[in-house]
Amino acid sequence: MDLSYILNELGEDREEYFRAVAPPIMQTSNFAFKKVDDLRKSFENEYATWLYSRGLNPTVEILRKKLAALDGAEDCLVFNSGAAAIFAAVLANVKSGDHIVSVSNPYTWAKRMFEVILPRFNVTVTYVDGKQANNFAKAIQSNTTVIYLETPNSWFLDLQDLAAIAAIAKKHSIITICDNSYCTPVYQKPIALGIDLVLQSATKYISGHSDTVAGVLCGARPMIERIFNSEYMNIGSGIQPFNAWLLIRGLRTLPVRLDRITRTTEKVVAFLKSHPRVEKVLFPLDPSFPQYELAKKQMGGACGLVTFHLKTNSGKTIEAFCESLKHILMAVSWGGHESLILPKCAGMSCEAFDAGNPDHRSLRLYIGLEEPDYLLADLSGALDAISSLS
């Protein structure tokens, strides 16, 4: 299906809403019926009609169709956060006594679910180094029901070979779930590589404006319908119509934003690699990246998330660098219009900082929509500000 058609036309029956170019926001909680039998049918199958906006809503429906098509999936659910999409996808596929194999160091709220919530229900998790597909095969137990992936990882950008891991999982009838937030469906299509469920934080590139929090879950229609009728409806984590409308707006410019961000990122990566205060730069589509060949094989692009390590003996130097930036904001998340910096040391106490550990000296940089020279000047100025510091 053509990308331009998906973003601009799919699901948009303009004759039904006064030929408006932009779809209206169906800001209603409820839908009325004229016949009791029609209401009865809605109770019997809420997945097939409008009944109550906790479930389905016309504005959300437009978004669902577009996002499913982008992922090459049969169906899609949109949640009020990426964490909610993770929770529903995993919870739908485990029961007491089951086992999960997860890539090591997953997203914070996935890890919290694995280590705090699921153990209450006797569900166990084994973490593996995902850079080798065979590590997943070795970790599979007789009660393994889910393999959880995140490629690239949002901090150190480790990749997993999706096709190889999907093949392993299918041999054992194990459900595969992949967080595709880093690449978006424009640059990576896990379902085409054999993954069962694909999720992403729509807060990031899908929105693109840093004004909406949302999560996406795509997969085969029977699986999505089963999740809708259980986890989605019970938890009440569906997106609201206004936020769905904001995401439809964001989708209009997704390809052009990704293209600009990608071109600027290439310049920023080259600058960082050449600077004497930068020890290492991690970026999947840079030839120096350890998994560069795999990145080229399964990714069509790498957007704007880069991790680099400063050369320093002190956490205070990292703090000084971040606080010297005049335009790049210090904040979590990524994918919006604004460039962001996030130092790893902010997530630990000053006493725990170990300069000998390169991970502690890492910073995650997101490149937004600003002019390249604007960002390079900001980075250069902040690096100059720490030139006399150890």
Image (spheres, rainbow, N blue to C red):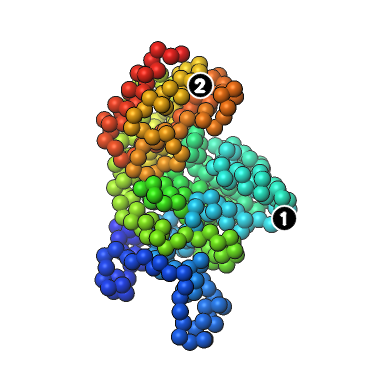
Place of residue 23 in the rendered image (x, y in percent of width and height, measured from the top left): 32, 65
What residue sits 46% from the left and 24% below the top? 319
- Please, is residue 334 above or below residue 202 in the view? above
The reply to whether residue 226 is visible in this rendering is no
Q: As displayed, is residue 288 above or below residue 246?
A: above
Residue 343 shows up from this direction? yes
- List x then y, in percent, for residue 289: 44, 31
Snapshot quadrant of residue 25: bottom left
Whole-angstrom CA distance, mark 1 to mark 2, is 43 Å
Depth check, front residue: 193 or 181: 181
Q: Position of residue 318 (x, y in %)?
A: 46, 23
**SS at badge 1:** loop
The percent position of residue 8, horizontal first and vertical second, equals: 30, 60
| Neighbourhood count class around disc 2 (C-alpha, 10 Å): few under 14, some 14–19, many 20 upward | many
Q: Kindly identify which numbered label has been placed on residue 315.
A: 2
Q: Residue at x 60, y 24 (%)?
A: 352
Q: In the rendered structure, find residue 185 and report the number of the disc placed on it.
A: none
The residue to which callout 1 is attached is: 96
Q: Label 1 neighbourhood size at 10 Å, few (<14), some (14-19), many (20+)?
A: few
Label whose residue precedes the other's in the sequence (1 or 2) = 1
Residue drawn at x 36%, y 37% is 339
Which three-letter amino acid code belongs to the residue tagged 1?
Ser
